[in-house]
C-alpha cells in the first residue's frame, strides 16, 4: 500500500513543481496558503533549525497542493470518468483485479456485444503480474423470467497453495501446484419473482494439476505421495440445480439471503470419480446504527458424498478454507477436506461514504466424517479490515487477521459474483 501512495505523492509533486507560482504569479491566487503566510508562521529565529529540518517535507506538501489544484483545474477526474463511460456505452468495461486472492495485481477487459433485443455475447480476459490467466466466453438469451446461458472458460493458475489434507495439516509442509482448467456448458434460469431465482446447469470440464511455477516452493508430491488428481488430467461432467433467495435491501438495512445447491460430478474417459456435492450459504444483516452500520452473519456448508465404486476426489476440487474470503487469520487455502463448515461475524461501520471499517471473527473446519466435528478441531481468528467501495461494490479489501498460527494481512483487488454452483470449478470467491 505504501508503494502506490509514494507514486501519487511524487506525481503530484512533479505536477506542482511544473506549475510553480514563481513562474506564473497569477497562479499564486490558487494556493490554499501562500508561501509568505507559511514563512510568517515559522518566522521566529528560534524555529530556524525546525525550518531547516522541515524543508523537504514542506517542498513535498507544497508540490502536492499545487498538483491537486492543477489536477482539478484541468478536470482530469471528470475526463477519465467521461472516457470510461464512453467505453461502457460501447460495451467495453475495464476490470481491475477479480482473479482471486494471491494472484497478483492485474486486470483485463470485459466486452458485451448486443446481438439482438434479447440476446448478447460476453467476452472477458484477465491477466495478473503472477501470470494468472482467465478467458471467458458466454452467449445469453433472456426474455421475461427466463434466461439461457451457454458459457465456457479457460484458466491458468500457476501458484496455488497446498499444505496437505485434513484439519491437522502442517504449515511447514507448504507446497504449490499449478492448475489448468477448461470447461463449457449450458445454464437455464427462471426468476418467477424479483427475489427468487432457480436454475439447472450442465458442464464438462478438463482439469490438470501440475508442479507449481514458483521455485521457492516444493511441488505437492515432495510431501504427499499418491495425492489424488496430481500429475494427471481429470475429465468429468457435472449436472446440478440451485435455488437462491435474495432478501437484501440497502447495505445498512435489515435483510438476508440464502443459497442452496446440489450437483453430481462423474468422471469421463479414464477418470474414475463419481460424487455428489451439496452447498448452502446463508447471510443475515442486522442494522445497529440506521444507515451507518450493520452486523453481518454468514454461514457456509459444503458436503461431498462419494458414490459406490468411485475413486477419491481430486484434491484441488475439495473444499478449502484460509484467506480473505474464509478464515482471514490463516494463510490462503490453508486447510483442505472432504466437507466444510464456516461461520463469520463482522460489524461493518461506514467511516466515509466509500469506506467501511470492519472488525470480524471467523471460525471454520474441514472434516471427512461427522465424528471429526469437534470443538478443538475448529480454527478461529479475529481481526480488523477496511472496504473501499464504489457504487458497483467493493474494489479493494484490506484485512488483518490474528489466529493460532500468527498474523495475516490480506489485500484483495476487485470483486466478482459467486458462481451459481461450485461444481468442478475452482477459483477465488469473495465475501459479499
Image: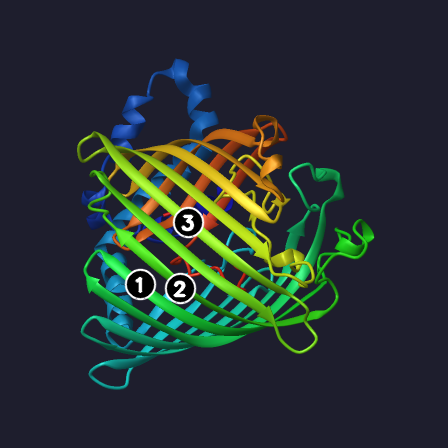
Residue 315's disc number? none
Identify the disc placed on residue 280: 3
Report helix, strand or loop for mark 1: strand
Count neighbours of disc 1 (C-alpha within 10 A) and say few if under 14, some if 14 to 19, many if 20 or more. some
Report the coloring of the rendering: rainbow
163 or 112, nearer to the observer: 163
Point out the tag, 1 or 2, that comes first from the N-terminus: 1
In three-dimensional space, the C-alpha distance between marks 3 and 2, rounded to whole angstroms, equals 12 Å
For the residues marked 1 and 2, what is the alpha-carbon distance in whole angstroms?
A: 8 Å
Residue at the location (62% across, 36% down)? Answer: 372
Q: Position of residue 304 (x, y in %)?
A: 56, 53
Q: Report the residue marked by disc 1.
A: 198
The part of the image, by quadrant, that contains residue 288 is top left
Q: Position of residue 183 (x, y in %)?
A: 53, 74
**Which residue has dot 2 on it?**
241
Q: Earlier in the sequence, mark 1 or mark 3?
A: 1
Amino acid at each position: 500500500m505504501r508503494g502506490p501512495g509514494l507514486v501519487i505523492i511524487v506525481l503530484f509533486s512533479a505536477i506542482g513543481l511544473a506549475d510553480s507560482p514563481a513562474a506564473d504569479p497569477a497562479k499564486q491566487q490558487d494556493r490554499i496558503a501562500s508561501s509568505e503566510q507559511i514563512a510568517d508562521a515559522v518566522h521566529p529565529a528560534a524555529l530556524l533549525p525546525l525550518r531547516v529540518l522541515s524543508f523537504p517535507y514542506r517542498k513535498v506538501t507544497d508540490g502536492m497542493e499545487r498538483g491537486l489544484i492543477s489536477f482539478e483545474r484541468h478536470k482530469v477526474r471528470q475526463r477519465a470518468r467521461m472516457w470510461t463511460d464512453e467505453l461502457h456505452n460501447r460495451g467495453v468495461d475495464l476490470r481491475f483485479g477479480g482473479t482471486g486472492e494471491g494472484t497478483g495485481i492485474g486486470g483485463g477487459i470485459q466486452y458485451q456485444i448486443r446481438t439482438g433485443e434479447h440476446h448478447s455475447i460476453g467476452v472477458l480476459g484477465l491477466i495478473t503480474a503472477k501470470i494468472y490467466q482467465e478467458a471467458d466466453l458466454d452467449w445469453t438469451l433472456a426474455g421475461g423470467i427466463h434466461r439461457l446461458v451457454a458459457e465456457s472458460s479457460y484458466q491458468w493458475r500457476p501458484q496455488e497453495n497446498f499444505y496437505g489434507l485434513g484439519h491437522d495439516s502442517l504449515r511447514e509442509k507448504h507446497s504449490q501446484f499449478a492448475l489448468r482448467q477448461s470447461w463449457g456448458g449450458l445454464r437455464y434460469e427462471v426468476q418467477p419473482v424479483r427475489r427468487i431465482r432457480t436454475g439447472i446447469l450442465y458442464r464438462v470440464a478438463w482439469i490438470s494439476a501440475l508442479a507449481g511455477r514458483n521455485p521457492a516452493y516444493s511441488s505437492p508430491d515432495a510431501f504427499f505421495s499418491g495425492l489424488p488428481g496430481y500429475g494427471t488430467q481429470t475429465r468429468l461432467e457435472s449436472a446440478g440445480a440451485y435455488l437462491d433467495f435474495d432478501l437484501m435491501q440497502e447495505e445498512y438495512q435489515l435483510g438476508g439471503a440464502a443459497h442452496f445447491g446440489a450437483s453430481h460430478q462423474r468422471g469421463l474417459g479414464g477418470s474414475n470419480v463419481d460424487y455428489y456435492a451439496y452447498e448452502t450459504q446463508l447471510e443475515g444483516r442486522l442494522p445497529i446504527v440506521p444507515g451507518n452500520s450493520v452486523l453481518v452473519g454468514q454461514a457456509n456448508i459444503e458436503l461431498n458424498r462419494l458414490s459406490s465404486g468411485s475413486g477419491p476426489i481430486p484434491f484441488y476440487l475439495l473444499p478449502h478454507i484460509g484467506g480473505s474470503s474464509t478464515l482471514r487469520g490463516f494463510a490462503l487455502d490453508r486447510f483442505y477436506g472432504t466437507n466444510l463448515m464456516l461461520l463469520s461475524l463482522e460489524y461493518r461501520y461506514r467511516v466515509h461514504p466509500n469506506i467501511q471499517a470492519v472488525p470480524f471473527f471467523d471460525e471454520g473446519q474441514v472434516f471427512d466424517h461427522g465424528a471429526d466435528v469437534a470443538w478443538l478441531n475448529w480454527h478461529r481468528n479475529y481481526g480488523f479490515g477496511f472496504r473501499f467501495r464504489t457504487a458497483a461494490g467493493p474494489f479493494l479489501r484490506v484485512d488483518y487477521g490474528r489466529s493460532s498460527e500468527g498474523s495475516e494481512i490480506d489485500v484483495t483487488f476487485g470483486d466478482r459474483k459467486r458462481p451459481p454452483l461450485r461444481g468442478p470449478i475452482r477459483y477465488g470467491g469473495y465475501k459479499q
